[in-house]
Amino acid sequence: MAISIKHRRHTQARQASRLRRQLRGRKKLQGTAERPRLVVTRSSKHMVAQLVNDLEGRTLVSASTMEADLRALDGDKTAKARRVGELVADRAKSAGISTVVFDRAGNKYAGRVAAVAEGAREGGLEF
């Protein structure tokens, strides 16, 4: 059985471009204990937001659309992404974190990535 790679022809270039943009941003951004990095990971179905302390290499707080209460939420993917932002902000507040550095991980600041940022701002985080 032969595997056809023809249907993935343009995906590799897009992935490589996004990884280059991601590395370019990571050279400038660094999360600390006082001001961790808010990393937004976007897939075709889900959104994940994490607060990362780069000095220790630890994830402090995370929220995702794969959690049970968000899976049951009605609405489109953008509404769920906004809720992820609000959730990560609430969890950060309970952990004593109020300011973060936003890391869009090479994705455009539009749509669901922007919705996570807006939800986090509404939840009380400062960028």
Image (tube, helix red, strand yellow):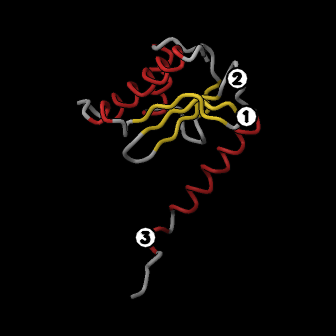
Per the model, the C-alpha gap separating discs 3 and 2 is: 44 Å
> For the point 72% across and 42% down, which residue is it?
24
Mark closest to the chain's N terminus, 3 or 2: 3
Crowding near the residue tagged with mark 2, few <14, some 14–19, many ≥20 C-alpha atoms within 10 Å: some
Element assignment for label 1: loop
Mark identifier at residue 7: 3
Q: Picture quarter containing residue 55?
A: top right
Q: What residue type is labelled 2?
A: Ala
What residue does disc 2 label?
A: 33
Element assignment for label 2: loop
> Cβ–Cβ below 8 Å for labels 1 and 2?
yes
> For the point 43% across and 81% down, which residue is it?
3
Mark closest to the chain's N terminus, 1 or 2: 2
> For the point 42% across and 86% down, which residue is it?
2
Crowding near the residue tagged with mark 1, few <14, some 14–19, many ≥20 C-alpha atoms within 10 Å: few
Mark closest to the chain's N terminus, 3 or 1: 3
**Image x and y of residue 68, in percent:** 31, 35
Mark identifier at residue 56: 1
Element assignment for label 3: helix
Q: Picture quarter containing residue 58?
A: top right
